[in-house]
Image (cartoon, rainbow, N blue to C red):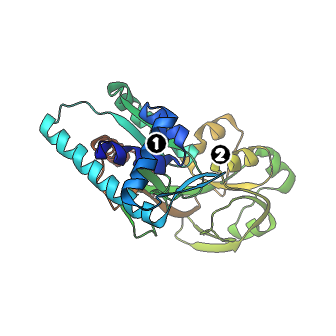
Amino acid sequence: MDKLQQLSVFRRVVETGNITRAARDLAMSQPSVSRIIGELEQRLGVPLLLRSPRGLAATEAGQLFHAEAVRILDRLEEAEANVRGAQASLAGPVRIACVASFFNQAVLPWLQDFLLANPEVVLEGRLDPKPIDLVGEGIDLAIRFGPIREQSLIARKLGRIDFALFASPSYLARAGLPTTPEELAEHDFCRLNVSSLTNLLTLDGPDGRTVSVEVHGRFSADSVDTINAAARAGLGIALLAPWSVTEEVASGRLVPVLPGWRAEPRDVHAAWPGNHSLPRRVRAILDILIEKTSAEPRLKAR
């Protein structure tokens, strides 16, 4: 059995957590993938995968072997690319983790021309609203908002995003339009479920004044799109990126609250596992994101 094939099959099984999906990605039969994993475990003399009704997960030995397999395969791909030259076509899967709103409104349009020019690159968007384990989930690149706390990741800052307050005309007609930040304490908020966020909202005013106020609400969700929808439905005030609600504001479905006041901007990063080099196709996508964000005025907070 080709050891490189074993490495490739094992890597895809770990990163998908599923024999059937790995077989589909590799254009192999499910029995063939299962046989290769069995032969690899037999050759190494240790179990590499834990099998359960929920899927497959790497054992401790499997995690170590997966990291080495990724490093070997990436170096091989890099070496082949160097030999073939820069004009060689790009091919293979790229998994990007990002919140749905930013992926749909920014990342996907930025990558449209690249995908059309490289038909053998297969892009998969993992639009989980919460940060996920990049290595365990087989993610090549993640777009994160706020600080990067995992020391195992390499990060590249792409820009900063402003946040401001918005509400529907129906909510403001019912609850009144706040004219000072202090009045926000008496209003309902549609809040994003993020562990780093608290009830304390700090706003910077156009005159340089900073005000902190404790806010509460009866609705929360872990999706920015859902918070947007809740605000449009009149459930409360929402803290949103102004550029993400331009259509809602233009159509009158949302109205700025306390115009000129902004919450603290959040840094936007591209992040990837630091235990292996980026495949050429992933590096190409990262380069596009860096180029696009550097020219994007919406990612330059005031």
Q: Secondary structure at mark 1?
A: helix
Dividing the image into 4 quarters, which one contains the N terminus? top left
Dividing the image into 4 quarters, which one contains the C terminus? bottom left
Sequence-first tag of 1 and 2: 1
* Disc 1 to disc 2, C-alpha distance: 43 Å
Label 2 Cα neighbours within 10 Å, binned few <14 / some 14-19 / many ≥20: some
Above or below: residue 106 compared with residue 213: above
Q: Residue furthest right?
A: 174
The foreground one among 3 and 250 is 3
Q: Which mark is residue 35?
A: 1
Q: Quadrant of residue 158?
A: bottom left
Residue 65 in view of the camera:
yes
Above or below: residue 66 compared with residue 125: below
Q: Secondary structure at mark 2?
A: helix
Q: Which mark is residue 296?
A: none
Q: Residue at x 33, y 48 (%)?
A: 290
Q: Which mark is residue 225?
A: 2
Name the amino acid, label 2: Asp
Residue 61 percent location from the top left of the image: 43, 65
Q: Residue at x 55, y 45 (%)?
A: 18
Residue 143 percent location from the top left of the image: 46, 52
Which one is closest to the eye, mark 1 or mark 2? Answer: 1
Label 1 Cα neighbours within 10 Å, binned few <14 / some 14-19 / many ≥20: few
The foreground one among 183 and 9 is 9
- Please state if 302 lies on the left or on the right of 176 as rendered: left
Q: Residue at x 43, y 55 (%)?
A: 41
Residue 300 in view of the camera:
no
Is disc 1 in contact with disc 2, using a CB cutoff of under 8 Å?
Answer: no
Q: How many marks?
A: 2
Residue 93 percent location from the top left of the image: 40, 38
Name the amino acid, label 1: Arg
The foreground one among 268 and 133 is 133
